Image: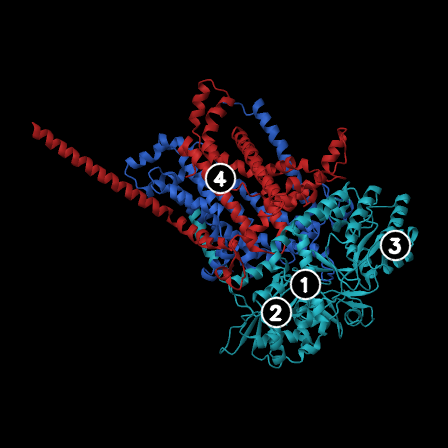
Amino acid sequence: MKKYLLLAMVMIMMISAASCNRPGVTSNEKGEMVTLKWLMPGPGEQQDSDMVWEEFNKKLKTYPGMENVQVDIEVIPVADYAQKYLLIQTSGEKVDIIQTYKLDYILEARNGSFMPLDDLINKETPDFKGQLPSWVWDYGLVDGETYIVPNYQQMNKAIWSVVTQADLAGQYWDVEKAEKVFKSNKTFNEECYDVIEEYLAALKDAGKIGLGFTGGNQSGKGYENLVDQYVISTYDDHPKVYHHYMTPETKLKYMKVAEWYKKGYIRKDSLSAEPQKDIGKKDGYTVWFEQTMEGAENRLESKYGYDLTVVWTDDSYYIPYICAAGGNAIAAGSKHPKEAIKLIELMNTEKGRELYNLLVYGIEDTHYKKISDDKIETFDYVGQSNSSAKYGLWKWIVGNAYYAFDTQNEIDGWKQYIFKEVNENGTGKTKYSKLIGFTPDLSALESKIAQISAVTGEYGKSLGSGALPNAEQIYEECIAKLNMAGNLEVTAELQRQVDEFLASKK
Amino acid sequence: MNSEIAKNTAIQKEKTSKMNLSRKAYVIKDNFELFLLALPGIILFFVFKYMPMYGIIIAFKKFNPNLGIWGSKWVGFKNFEFFFTSQDAWRVTRNTVLYSLDFIVIGLIAAVAIALMLYNLRSRTAVKVYNTVMILPKFLSMVLIAYIVYAMLNPSAGLLNQILGVFGGPSDIDWYSKPEAWPFILTIVHIWQVVGMDSIVYYAALMGIDESLFESAMIDGANKWQQTIYIAIPHLIPIITITTTLALGHIFSGDFGLFYQTTRDVGTLYPTTDIINTYTFRGLVGGHLEVASAVGLFQSVVGLILVVVTNSIVRKINPENSLF
Amino acid sequence: MEKKYSIGQLTLHAFFIIASLTYILPFILLISISISSEAAINQFGYTLFPKVIDFRAYKEIFNNPAQIIDSYKVTVIFSLLTTALSVFVMTLTAYPLSRPNCKFKGILTFYIFFTMLFGGGLVPSYIINTRYLHLDNTIWIYVLPALVNAWHIIIIRTFFQGLPEGLVEAAKIDGASELRTYFQIIMPLSTPVISTIAFFVIVSKWNDWNTALVYIRTPKLYSLQYMLQKILRESEFVNKIAQESSSSMFQDYQIPTESMRYAMAILAAGPMLIVFPFFQKHFTKGLTIGAIKG
């Protein structure tokens, strides 16, 4: 009896809970209103999302051509984005604009999920193409046709520089020499390791080795990511494709850490440890790597709280062929491509600047304080917003990060530096990948790639830790397994496609 | 005289046939009522389990969300290539099956033992407390459990190494580089994790034993041990048969979280800890729904065959204990 | 009558106390970490008793109390609802399976059991649940698909089979229909199994975060576990990205501290542990005898 009473009570409660509508999007009036549905990854829906989006829609009406347009934005938590997108597609839900971060946009374009954009842009937003560098547009090409409007932001490949405690470096290391060695070598070779080893040996002798050395992706110097686990060399005129374990530098890395482990330069529990947790602790690692850009010293020092020495391993920048952030695409089935492309244009160009910042940062004085014309101070978060903030989207998802306000997290002049000096090669030191616009097609080799993936997962961490006593043997075993899983065919096919692409560009 | 007998026989026959008829009517009536009782369940299963089953064909297609499940291209057994042509297929299958069998047997012994022990406790409060404590792991995510294991097995600061050191053994063993230790480690962790909940089922079953049986046994001079073996355990046989049969259906599958998180995904341990589920996960990092579906289908088919076979064997021994 | 504290009893208690320690100690560790200050954790690692107490983790989680209250509310509602309805439907379904005179029990058992092994996967379920049944983004998506569970039904059936034949026979002789037999005789005797299954269901629903991940778009309807998991998944994701090269995008992302993760675990688990003894109460012996004798 009690149970049935409970049931009745619960049902009453449930009925009231279930009948909730999403506020913020007004219903269509007179059928003239065009509603665009925009799907993007981010921190998920936040406390003030509806409030900001209502304001956004109000402001949107003031832009020419957008008087009848409103936008229904959905921000999906980034960790779930790929899966959610798959489900939305399969259930046939109607969307108009899709941001492609963490989606395989090449596959989606080939599968027919996206609308080709070249004609649309030429017709509806003819000035758009001129607003972004042409190589940025090239990122959005799939098989020669534009499918996404890439998010223009910091594009360069990370420089993995060596970081160490300033007081130790001052005493035990010839930092200038190290920097010279790093920068003069095209890849991270034996000489580079030797100069680090000098330091480690000195530390060990002095009893100050701490947790020792931990690596980053230093072996990636001179290479860039091609596809999944494959890289391609970039330091010479004949780019060569390798599985990323099989470059000479990677092998060198594995052999070196094994050697250093035996010499005591690496922590004993490195096999199962999580390096991320201890990086930066004052009595943690004494030599580690960080991804660096201009101003790295300040940023890291304020993060960790003590003086650091950052030794740059490169002084040129490299713009890779993979556009990490993806871009905004228009769904193939969208009924409002005109309005959609116009909205995307607003998010990526000067004329939509105010609107873009509204969407990214929220409402002035509620979510941030304006410090100067282009600088603000965000309230609930520093840097990137997260799900606990009242409001904040990620500028490199929404549109062109160049037009976003600088926050208290960026050093003065940061944006100009990144976009003008680095991206657009103001310093002359930027190199661009020859492969921008290349879209590989490996559908015939899918099961081999999956098997290769499985093998890679088995060896990467252990070899990287240095804790294996018979590292060379294990390494050979790994290579043999990779080849058996089809590595040679995949490498050959990728090389063939790359060569074909490069030849066609000439 | 003959006509009397004939008339009586006729009347008897009529009565019997009337009774047969009414018995048949009772059977039909009973079955109809039983069917009504089962109807809500039947409908729910149909809507939520059977209707979506057409998705199994994803295993045979190249899934393109824009074309939907039906519209996507048929590729036959191509999706099975990943697993069946892989050089590790044997290793991971062997591991999966061995662990499943190991967990079934040892898990059963542990759960039944705990249930019996709880059953024999006089103090009701104690039973409640112990039971509550033992189900704690059910509320911890695998990540947290893996962390606890790490705190024990950490080569530098782990509890286990410290204890070994105290007893004069080596105190810096790197457990994460010793694949041979892990079948034991994983079994202990798994049992620790599930025995609380699993024992509840057997404990509830024990609740159904008629107390008078124990009383008469005691009068006959049986001690606790004999009472357990001759009364309690036989009462549990039906439920044990069922849970074991059902567990065999999942023999080609394993708890992904346990094998992935607890081992910290350290590759050196794969020879003894890599199972079908973790292997597939590693290979399909980019998505590939259809391959995962194919592997899943394979696991299910094998499981089904095993259950059907086991069930037929059980049916021959004692039809009452069989699943169906 | 055995003495309450005989040697046998003491041995049992000793065993259980030691076993319990292996469960309690990690749990205490978790609580301790959740109330330790981050600095202390960095310095001393994980300790059984916090070196520096700091409730910041809990404060941060409760930063947006409206959200937590909503999630707690939703979770309590659908957990109770599912449990009540589910137990009802499943015992109804299990009963015919246990009756020897049921002609279709073999088929029905197989029909139910088959679903344990075979399923279409997420995609077709999603299509059916959203496109045809319109359950997405409502509280019913938590409830309806979870109402029947093959394993539970089979357990209940086994329990019913264990009840003495004599009861049903007696009822039949008195002229009771199957329906009456079920409600008036079988059900009252089934408290142990009903409590057991009810507990399994409520735990399963309480821990459910997958449903919300897939089907819920409105934060008001997020289940408690999903809300907590969301934060954890976000930080796991960011950690993973941080190890990949050429990504500056998440460089200064603030991830939840260790103590916050453990605080979330405690918040999620807590209520169930309080609720369990309530179910435990019904694991009582000896009802059967009374029924036969009476």
**Disc on the earlier residue, 1 or 3:** 3
Question: Where is residue A228 shown, x and y percent of the image?
Answer: 67, 57
Instruction: Identify the disc placed on residue A166.
Output: 3
Q: Distance between the residues labelled 3 and 2?
A: 46 Å
Q: Kindly indicate the quadrant of the structure image that contains residue B269.
A: top right
**Residue bearing mark 2:** A329
Disc 1 to disc 2: CB gap under 8 Å? no
Query: Helix, strand or loop at disc 2?
Result: strand
Disc 4 to disc 3: CB gap under 8 Å? no
Mark whose residue sits in front, 4 or 3: 4
How crowded is the residue under tag 2: few (<14 C-alpha within 10 Å), some, or many (20+)?
Answer: many
**Disc on the earlier residue, 3 or 2:** 3
Query: Helix, strand or loop at disc 1?
Result: helix
Q: Do labels 1 and 2 share a chain?
A: yes
- Amino acid under disc 3: Ala
The answer to whether one can see residue A301 in this image is yes
Q: Which chain does the residue under circle 2 lie in? A: A
How crowded is the residue under tag 3: few (<14 C-alpha within 10 Å), some, or many (20+)?
Answer: some
Chain C color in figure: blue
Chain A color in figure: cyan
The foreground one among A343 and A390 is A343
**Residue bearing mark 4:** B306
- Amino acid under disc 4: Leu
**Residue bearing mark 1:** A497
- Amino acid under disc 1: Gln
Q: Which chain does the residue under circle 3 lie in? A: A
Q: Is B255 above or below relative to C288?
A: below
Question: Where is residue C101 shown, x and y percent of the image?
Answer: 33, 38
Question: Where is residue B231 shown, x and y percent of the image?
Answer: 46, 26
